[in-house]
Amino acid sequence: MKHLTAEVKKHAYRAGFDLVGITNPQPSAYVARYRDWLAKGYHADMDYMARPDAVEKRADPRVVMPEARSIVVVGMNYYHGGFPPIGTGRGRVSRYAWGGDYHDVMMNNLRQLADRIESLVGEPVAHRAYVDFGPLMERELAQRAGLGWFGKNTTLIHPTFGSYVFLGELLLTLELETDTPLRKSRCGSCTACLDACPTGALVAPGVLDAQRCISYLTIEHRGAIPRALRPLIGDWIFGCDTCQEVCPWNQRFAHQATGSGLDPRCKTLGLTELLTLDEHTFRARFRETPLWRPRRAGLLRNAAVVLGNVGSPAALPILEQASGDEDSLVAEHAAWAWQRISSS
């Protein structure tokens, strides 16, 4: 088993992953905390997270795959440095979305790994692969597999990569040796992430209220952004990296990703240009990227908010035009931005 485990890890690195660890499919130790988080409404309107069947699966990976014997947890570094100088007409994009769709890249690599494992053992191995979309407690699985600890900003922090890491899982019917969990937090008394959060979304160490989180508001949220929170979004048009940027572990250890197939395409976006995109043009430009997630209405809504925060009077004509957009979500936020600039 020891030799097979070593070979599996070797092939995981060859498949393009930067981190690999192995754990078993035992029930989660954090179900009570997760249920409490849901009970407080911190999941906002992401109702899929609170469905009874989803909670049951998160509580125990064996509900997802009863025959699973091992879980290979992988990580891929996505750090590509800082932002270029940002003018008043542009908005910042969270680093995870600078390149192509990481789900596609990671899933392709996991499929390659599954094929190589079958070659190693000389027979088919039943498996299931997940990247950020399955009903798994993936950060806990990564912690159990020795890939990091839970940061106070809720991310998984690796001691030599920091937190700019995508996670993926391969559930296998194969018995493998497990790694030693990295249970002890190394955050110490640091509260940099809590102190820096623009909206106060980190309500306690390791506890995130999605209702106030800029990443949630600009990506997952489908409705209007609360007016009180709009000025706090600043120039973040898609996601937010503030709690990671101030983390000492990232400042010290985050290093340039290489060979991931996720080279940066856009670190910032032109705001007035976005507000001119129709549905067809938006789809053609963003369909194969993470920026597709909020759809046209969501991304243009975000562009209007950022213009209201950082824009100049030169943006007023395009905002006036956008305030007549056929989508009421875009129109309302454009009108808000127009008023904010006009009255400043």
Image: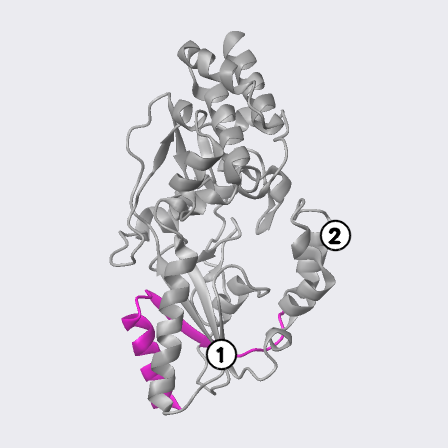
Q: Give the residue furthest to the top.
A: 343
Position of residue 85 measured from the top left corner of the image (x, y, whole percent) = 29, 28
Q: Residue at x 52, y 64 (%)?
A: 138
Answer whether residue 37 is visible to the viewer in this image: no
Q: Which residue is mark 2?
A: 39
**With respect to residue 45, does 124 lie above or below?**
below
Position of residue 29 measured from the top left corner of the image (x, y, whole percent) = 63, 69
**With respect to residue 309, does 163 lie above or below?**
below
Mark 1 vs mark 2: in front: 1
**241 left or right of 226?**
left
**With respect to residue 88, does 210 lie above or below?**
below
Per the rendered image, the range of residues in magenta is 1-29
In 3D space, how far apart are the residues under numbered discs 1 and 2 (Cα atoms)?
33 Å
**30 left or right of 92?**
right
Position of residue 291 measured from the top left corner of the image (x, y, whole percent) = 44, 42
SS for callout 2: helix
